[in-house]
Image (tube, rainbow, N blue to C red):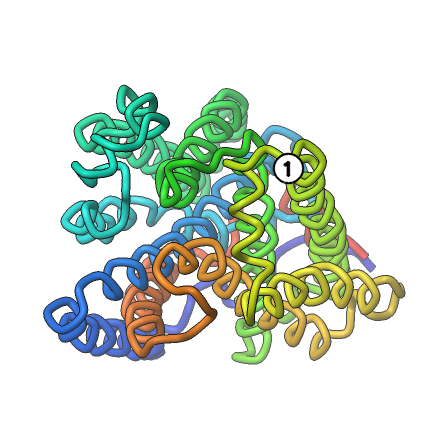
């Protein structure tokens, strides 16, 4: 039997204090992190950068997801699309939390070291690109672009809730089509700036795609966890059904393969070319206890999700999906740590600042999501494809 209307309460409960809980955790985490800024500034800035890229990569993944749904006119995702829309709408948070990184540039990036500039020819060769003013200008462009796309798409979606004007759906595709192309360039260059340039000698033309694959896989896991939370809170239980979880699991399954393909391709091409400036990056990450995490990502981010989600019934097994999603999010953070920290440490180690900065930025980001999510309908209720999505089985 087909549903002809949405039967759930579409407003997130005003009485829920979950946003305040996360805001409180975020403030505490940032205050504790501030201690590290004065006691161990170098560790603080590296830990902060990893936590920032964790939040940013997931936010970028949700922005891509939303634009992809609009340009393909996908109906299956409409009933939960407000979740990634809301995350993407808060992209304006990124330039704010990026400010501390700007104060730590000299701690983070060796291409600002005067001695290295004077002694290293390759670093001098990259100076037209790797310099502080141009770095700041590029990041202003990245953040302005993402904030515009996220805000405009969310604003149009809310406007459709209020007016039921289906012409807005055309506007969404008009924004999303060029938006995805711009996203591809800005996302790739942001990954070069934030992470790849930590080692000024290393370069990989595949790193931007690798960063995207990691972030999008983690973003899908976040969307799944939020949908599971809504169900467990008794929300949208008649709106988001097993068919939607099945499709999300299919996409997660597919992008686990894509992640493995991209990460292995990057490694294999560098291994085969055997250029010292490229191979040394992997050499350090295959030494000591760093190597354990290198193989952990292969198993945890590809083999386990691939094997567990291979069966049809597994894709609608909510406890299993929850466990896989939570594991992928944890591994995403660890992989960003694995990318950045060998510049600072010879062996894999965790500092209390890694946890404090993650709790601080993560708490603020999640608190802001629920603060925004409760303001409007949890479902794009007047979307032209909402009933088709509602009746998906």
Residue 297 located left or right of residue 159: right
**Given the current orientation, which residue lies at the most extreme front position?**
119
In this view, the residue in front, 162 or 80, is: 80
Q: Quadrant of residue 384?
A: top right
Q: Quadrant of the N terminus?
A: bottom right
Residue displayed at 55% across by 29% down: 205
Residue 109 located left or right of residue 155: left
Residue 359 located left or right of residue 316: left
Q: Residues within 10 Å of mark 1 (few under 14, many from 20)?
A: many
When the figure is inspected, residue 309 is found, relative to residue 124, above or below; the finding is: below
Residue displayed at 33% across by 49% down: 90
In this view, the residue in front, 147 or 28, is: 28
Residue 343 located left or right of residue 220: left
Residue displayed at 21% across by 52% down: 107
Q: Measured from the top left, where is residue 215 in percent x and y?
A: 53, 50
**Given the current orientation, which residue lies at the most extreme left position?**
38
In this view, the residue in front, 85 or 335, is: 335
Q: Quadrant of residue 38?
A: bottom left
When the figure is inspected, residue 15 is found, relative to residue 86, above or below; the finding is: below
When the figure is inspected, residue 377 is found, relative to residue 144, above or below; the finding is: below
Q: Measured from the top left, where is residue 222 in percent x and y?
A: 54, 62
Residue wearing tag 1: 270
Residue 197 visible to the viewer? yes
């Amino acid at each position: 039997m087909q549903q002809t209307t949405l039967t759930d309460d579409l407003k997130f409960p005003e009485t829920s204090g979950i946003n305040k809980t996360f805001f409180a955790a975020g403030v505490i985490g940032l205050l504790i992190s501030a201690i590290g800024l004065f006691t161990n500034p170098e560790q603080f800035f590296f830990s902060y950068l990893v936590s920032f890229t964790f939040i940013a990569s997931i936010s970028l993944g949700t922005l891509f997801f939303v634009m992809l749904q609009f340009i393909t006119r996908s109906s299956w995702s409409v009933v939960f699309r407000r979740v990634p829309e809301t995350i993407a709408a808060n992209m304006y948070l990124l330039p704010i939390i990026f400010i501390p990184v700007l104060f730590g540039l000299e701690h983070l990036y060796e291409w600002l070291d005067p001695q290295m500039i004077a002694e290293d020819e390759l670093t001098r060769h990259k100076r037209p690109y790797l310099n502080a003013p141009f770095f700041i200008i590029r990041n202003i462009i990245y953040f302005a672009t993402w904030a515009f796309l996220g805000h405009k798409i969310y604003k149009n979606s809310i406007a459709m809730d209020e007016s039921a004007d289906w012409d807005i759906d055309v506007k969404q595709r008009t924004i999303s089509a060029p938006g995805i192309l711009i996203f591809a360039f800005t996302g790739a260059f942001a990954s070069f700036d934030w992470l790849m340039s930590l080692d000024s000698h290393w370069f990989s033309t595949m790193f931007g795609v690798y960063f995207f694959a990691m972030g999008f896989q983690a973003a899908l896991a976040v969307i799944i966890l939020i949908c599971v939370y809504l169900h467990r809170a008794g929300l949208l239980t008649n709106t988001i059904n097993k068919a939607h979880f099945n499709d999300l699991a299919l996409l997660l399954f597919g992008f686990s393969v894509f992640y493995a393909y991209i990460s292995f391709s990057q490694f294999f091409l560098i291994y085969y070319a055997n250029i010292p400036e490229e191979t040394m990056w992997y050499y350090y990450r295959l030494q000591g206890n760093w190597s354990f995490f290198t193989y952990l990502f292969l198993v945890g981010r590809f083999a386990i999700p691939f094997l567990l989600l291979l069966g049809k019934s597994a894709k609608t097994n909510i406890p299993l999906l929850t466990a896989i999603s939570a594991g992928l999010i944890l591994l995403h953070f660890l992989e960003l740590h694995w990318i950045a920290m060998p510049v600072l440490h010879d062996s894999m180690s965790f500092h209390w600042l890694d946890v404090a900065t993650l709790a601080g930025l993560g708490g603020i980001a999640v608190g802001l999501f629920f603060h925004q999510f409760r303001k409007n309908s949890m479902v794009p209720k007047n979307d032209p494809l909402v009933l088709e999505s509602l009746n998906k089985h």
